[in-house]
Image (cartoon, rainbow, N blue to C red):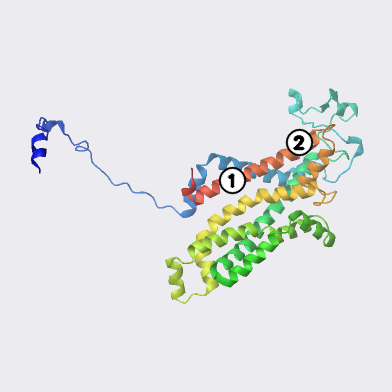
């Protein structure tokens, strides 16, 4: 130490009492806490249940599915039953009518009493052909949910398999498969469905074929990206060293490790598929009459929007709830399978 430092160094006296220092945990007995071993699915459910928005979305989806299955059965009406004597009737519910809402009044007039049918109830009203909208809305929800289920199946079967194979083999195989995807993705869905309508009967068949041609592209890109991350992992190299075949590695080693993310992305495709069906039906390229879907109901109700706004409100409400609930549900699944993405 230099002389300057020795001359100018402050002198610190030890004025501390040893009793000033006390061990905080001197009298506390520490015990190891043993946590119960839980399965991966239980951890996923615990993480999912903490997301209140996702739980609400799941509840709403469950209620809509139950109503779509049971609603047309217990309504007492057929979705294609025409009764011109009851056309354009406002909503009429047996309990709510007593408190002044859904009591069959429109523009201050009881439309049911005016036609002498006050003992008849149409919960969502009727359309311009006298068909019960409650039955048609839930019948249309069945079709929309079925198309959403088909979209998820196409995503998982075609999109996931295509992306796994393309990403795993790489090289020329990957280049050719990705150029093919870019060509298909360049075809607008609306043009594709219109062209299919010239060959196939219009309706659900053309929509499903359109989803089979273009609906899986997003899933294939996601699965390809996940494979590119994992294919050089040590356990994959170990499987190759032990002589495992390529497709065994793809579907037994790689796929189980990314299946959670792929299921989550498949759930995100459900609102898109429902909206696609509704949009095509609204444009007249979807489900033909007298069948009903949420898109056709919105299209029919739009024609009478200024005169009978209730005709469009029920279908729009169900469609909005479906899309919002599936988005919340998919967001909760994403956080449950990958807790690192939580905000």
Q: Which mark is residue 268?
A: none
Horizontal arrangement in the rendering, residue 152 relative to residue 300 (left or right): left
Q: Could you say whether the residue bearing mark 2 is in a helix, strand or loop?
A: helix
Secondary structure category for the residue under label 1 = helix
Does residue 292 appear anywhere in the picture? no
In the rendered structure, which disc, 2 or 1, sits on the residue that comes first in sequence? 2
Q: Quadrant of residue 301?
A: top right
Mark 2 neighbour class, 10 Å CA radius: few under 14, some 14 to 19, many 20 or more: some
Q: Check the image and report above or below for 17 versus 222.
A: above
Q: Nearer the viewer, residue 337 or 86?
A: 337
Tell me the quarter of the picture where residue 93 sits.
top right
Q: Position of residue 112 (x, y in %)?
A: 86, 29
Circles 2 and 1, Cβ within 8 Å, touching? The answer is: no
Query: Could you tell me which residue is drawn at 86 percent across and 28 percent down?
Result: 111
Left or right: 171 with respect to 291? left
Which residue in the protein does label 1 denote?
Answer: 329
Q: Nearer the viewer, residue 49 or 273?
A: 273
The CA distance from mark 2 to mark 1 is: 24 Å
Residue nearest the observer in this picture, 175 or 110 = 175
Horizontal relation, residue 100 to residue 153: left or right: right
Q: Position of residue 180 (x, y in %)?
A: 67, 66
Q: Is residue 254 above or below residue 80?
A: below
**Residue corresponding to mark 2:** 313
In the figure, is residue 240 to the left or right of 164? Answer: left
| Residue name at image x 71 percent, y 58 percent | 211
Give residue 99's quadrant in the image: top right
């Amino acid at each position: 130490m230099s002389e300057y430092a020795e001359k100018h160094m402050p002198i610190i006296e030890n004025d501390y009492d040893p009793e000033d220092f006390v061990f905080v945990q001197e009298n506390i007995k520490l015990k190891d806490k043993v946590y119960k071993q839980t399965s991966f699915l239980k951890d996923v459910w615990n993480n999912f249940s903490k997301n209140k928005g996702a739980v609400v979305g799941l509840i709403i989806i469950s209620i809509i599915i139950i109503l779509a299955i049971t609603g047309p059965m217990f309504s007492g009406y057929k979705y294609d039953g025409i009764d011109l004597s009851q056309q354009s009737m406002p909503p009429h519910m047996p309990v709510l009518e007593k408190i002044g809402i859904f009591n069959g009044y429109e523009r201050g007039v009881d439309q049911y009493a005016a036609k002498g049918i006050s003992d008849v109830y149409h919960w969502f009203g009727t359309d311009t052909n006298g068909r019960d909208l409650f039955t048609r809305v839930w019948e249309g929800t069945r079709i929309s949910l079925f198309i959403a289920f088909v979209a998820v199946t196409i995503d998982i079967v075609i999109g996931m398999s295509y992306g796994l194979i393309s990403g795993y083999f790489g090289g020329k195989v990957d280049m050719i498969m990705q150029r093919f995807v870019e060509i298909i993705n360049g075809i607008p869905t609306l043009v594709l469905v219109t062209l299919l309508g010239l060959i196939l009967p219009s309706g659900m068949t053309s929509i499903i074929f359109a989803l089979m041609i273009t609906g899986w592209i997003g899933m294939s890109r996601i699965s390809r990206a996940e494979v590119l991350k994992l294919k050089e992992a040590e356990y994959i190299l170990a499987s190759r060293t032990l002589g495992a075949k390529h497709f065994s590695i793809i579907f037994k080693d790689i796929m189980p490790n990314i299946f959670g993310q792929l299921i989550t992305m498949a759930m995100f495709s459900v609102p898109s598929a429902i909206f696609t069906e509704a949009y095509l039906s609204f444009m007249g390229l979807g489900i033909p009459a007298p069948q009903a879907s949420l898109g056709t109901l919105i299209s029919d109700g739009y024609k009478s929007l200024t005169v009978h706004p209730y005709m469009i409100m029920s279908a729009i409400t169900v469609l909005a709830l479906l899309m919002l609930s599936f988005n919340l549900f998919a967001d909760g699944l994403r956080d449950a399978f990958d807790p690192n993405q939580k905000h």
